[in-house]
């Protein structure tokens, strides 16, 4: 079990530090440079995308969840567990005078006018078939697992709205972007589903459809 100083050294070394808390907890306050991969049924899938197989990884979680996470990661060949940190390491980090990171969030109604005016870049992190079935107008499509490799494709001249189908993947993606130094990314609450349900315009195969 490590300390805030240990985690600072791990992040500085470039190690993968996975924060297993729910997305809402991570958004409210997290240690900068950590990746949010909630411990749910998709945990090993996203960890497999985001952690290199020869790379030591660190985990922020309670003790019971660490044991489960290590088992699940070992099953996909990620077995270089270096250290774990209890959930109170986040509070310890803040108490030591270091700032916490947060994740800005917005909803479809709030951001729709800015999208219509071209004031923001919409980044769709879903898979190809989801994107082709319908997406926000003018959105840039890069699946969450490819963000690191395709970072140069993301414009930096406007605020970035990160969006998936319902909000789970965009939360992970926003943490990836923050780790990569993208500081102007905002997570779209409810993702494409909320956008479509709100009656906002959707592009499908080159055509714009009203909903």
Image: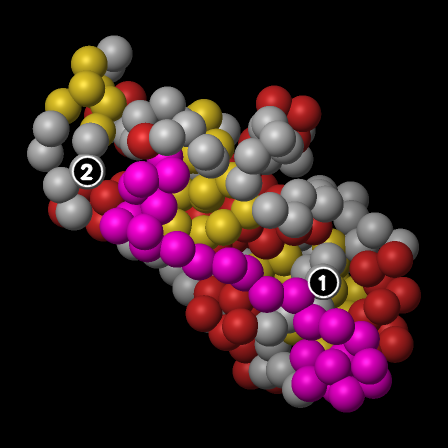
- Left or right of 166? Residue 100 is right
Foreground residue among 102 and 48: 102
Asked if residue 195 shows in the view, the reply is yes
Q: Secondary structure at mark 1?
A: loop
Q: On the image, numbered disc 1 is attached to which residue? A: 32
Earlier-in-chain disc, 1 versus 2 = 1
Question: Which of the two marks, 1 or 2, is nearer to us in this view?
Answer: 2
Q: Residue at x 77, y 87 (%)?
A: 95
Q: Work out how far the residue at label 1 is from the one at label 2, CA to CA, in angstroms.
A: 34 Å
From this view, report whether residue 56 is shown above or below residue 66: above
Q: Which residue is mark 2?
A: 200
For the record, the magenta segment spans 90-115
- Rendered position, 142 above or below 89: above
Q: Give the image quarter of residue 59.
A: bottom right
Q: Position of residue 172 (x, y in %)?
A: 51, 52
The structure residue drawn at horizontal position 69% and vertical position 85%, both measured from the top left corner, is 91
Quadrant location, the C terminus: top left
**Is 177 displayed left or right of 112 in the figure?**
right
Q: Tell which residue pokes out farthest to the top in this image.
A: 206
Q: Secondary structure at mark 2?
A: loop
**Camera-nearest residue between 111 and 66:** 111
Q: Position of residue 40 (x, y in %)?
A: 42, 64
Q: Residue 117 vs residue 182: left or right?
A: left
The scheme the figure's colours follow is secondary structure
Figure quadrant of the N terminus = bottom right
Q: Where does the image place residue 56, in percent across and percent down from the top left?
A: 79, 55
Q: Callout 2 environment at 10 Å: few (<14), some (14 to 19), or many (20+)?
A: some
The answer to which quarter of the image holds residue 66 is bottom right
């Amino acid at each position: 079990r490590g300390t805030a100083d240990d985690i600072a050294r791990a992040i500085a070394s470039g190690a993968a530090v996975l924060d297993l808390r729910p997305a809402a907890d991570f958004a409210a306050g997290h240690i900068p440079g950590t990746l949010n991969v909630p411990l749910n049924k998709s945990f090993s899938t996203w960890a497999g995308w985001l952690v290199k197989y020869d790379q030591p990884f660190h985990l922020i979680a309670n003790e019971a969840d660490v044991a489960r996470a290590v088992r699940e990661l070992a099953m996909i060949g990620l077995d270089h567990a270096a250290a774990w940190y209890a959930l109170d390491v986040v509070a310890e980090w803040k108490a030591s005078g270091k700032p916490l990171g947060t994740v800005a969030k917005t909803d479809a109604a709030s951001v729709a006018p800015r999208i219509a005016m071209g004031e923001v870049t919409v980044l769709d992190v879903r898979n190809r078939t989801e994107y082709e079935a319908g997406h926000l107008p003018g959105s840039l499509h890069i699946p969450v697992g490819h963000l690191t490799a395709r970072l140069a494709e993301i414009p930096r001249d406007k605020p970035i709205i990160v969006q998936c189908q319902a909000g789970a993947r965009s939360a992970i993606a926003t943490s990836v972007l923050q780790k990569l130094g993208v500081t102007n990314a905002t997570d779209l609450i409810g993702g494409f589903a909320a956008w479509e349900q709100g009656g906002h315009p959707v592009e499908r195969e080159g055509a714009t459809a009203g909903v």
